[in-house]
Image (cartoon, rainbow, N blue to C red):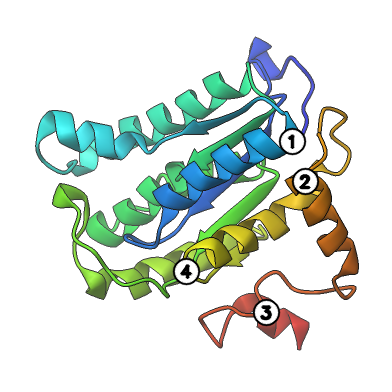
Amino acid sequence: MAFEPIGPRGTPILTATLIAIVGAESTGKSTLAQDLTLHLSQATGLRCTLVPEYLREWCEVQQRTPRIAEQAGIAAEQTARIEAAAQTHDLVICDTSALMTAIYSQYLFSDASLLAEALAFHRRCALTLLTALDLPWVADGLQRDGAHVRRPIDTAIRAALLNGGLNWSVVAGSGMARLEAALNAITPLLKHQRQARQGLFTRLNARQDALPEWRWACENCDVPECEHQAFKR
């Protein structure tokens, strides 16, 4: 999504295409973000970069999980790093956004105060990818609470996006299938990028053009009651 160079109060506006990856813990967000950045860099010739999850860095430094008063600062830093990357790149892959901090604040501390600003950021993104719950849960240090939290967190993410009037695409499958699903969702956004090269980008474009009209990106969603499916009916 492109923006004018100057925003309200002199704040610089992002000129890069932002792709945000959100999802419950242990659903492959970081792996998908890394794979997407590598493939899109090679396939399109665009200046692509990955902004990793700041919370991971924070927990490693502090050797604990955040308290309620620290959540806002973590969310703000995540967004600031994305905005900084967007000033010097064409395409920014966001390995989570402030929305995840807001969702966990709501879940752990019953604090919904960070949601509005987090959703405002997602309105500036060209695409939000939601990683499905079809991967096995794997422990990962301080950041993960257990498989039992994945369903409520996934539900909370969907509710927040839906209530915010935002669209998203569910990315499911394992290995290359998961990556290909994400690339299929991203390809239409890059059709008009002049810098795009041939190769994988061209192949994905051809496949995208061959898909049936009105194909839903989440038609293979892991949740039968998916809000998108309800809208389709």
Tag 2 near tag 1, CB within 8 Å: yes
Q: Residue furthest front?
A: 199
Question: Upstream in the sequence, badge 2 or badge 1?
Answer: 1
- Residue 204 higher or lower than 173, as above or below: above
Image point (73%, 14%), residue name: 6
At label 3, the amino acid type is Glu
x, y (%) of residue 211?
A: 85, 71
Residue picked out by circle 1? 44
Question: Upstream in the sequence, badge 1 or badge 4?
Answer: 1
Tag 1 near tag 4, CB within 8 Å: no
Residue picked out by circle 3? 219
- Find the distance from the CA under tag 2 to the CA under tag 3: 23 Å
Q: Is residue 163 visible?
A: no
Image point (51%, 46%), residue name: 35
Residue picked out by circle 2? 201
- Residue 211 higher or lower than 44, as above or below: below
**In this rendering, would 208 be left or right of 119?**
right
- Find the distance from the CA under tag 2 to the CA under tag 4: 21 Å
x, y (%) of residue 80?
A: 47, 24
Q: Between 85 and 6, which is closer to the camera in this rendering?
A: 85
Q: Residue furthest left?
A: 63
Q: Quadrant of the C terminus?
A: bottom right
Of labels 2 and 3, the one closer to you: 2
Q: Residues within 10 Å of mark 1 (few under 14, many from 20)?
A: many
Question: Upstream in the sequence, badge 2 or badge 3?
Answer: 2
Question: Upstream in the sequence, badge 2 or badge 4?
Answer: 4
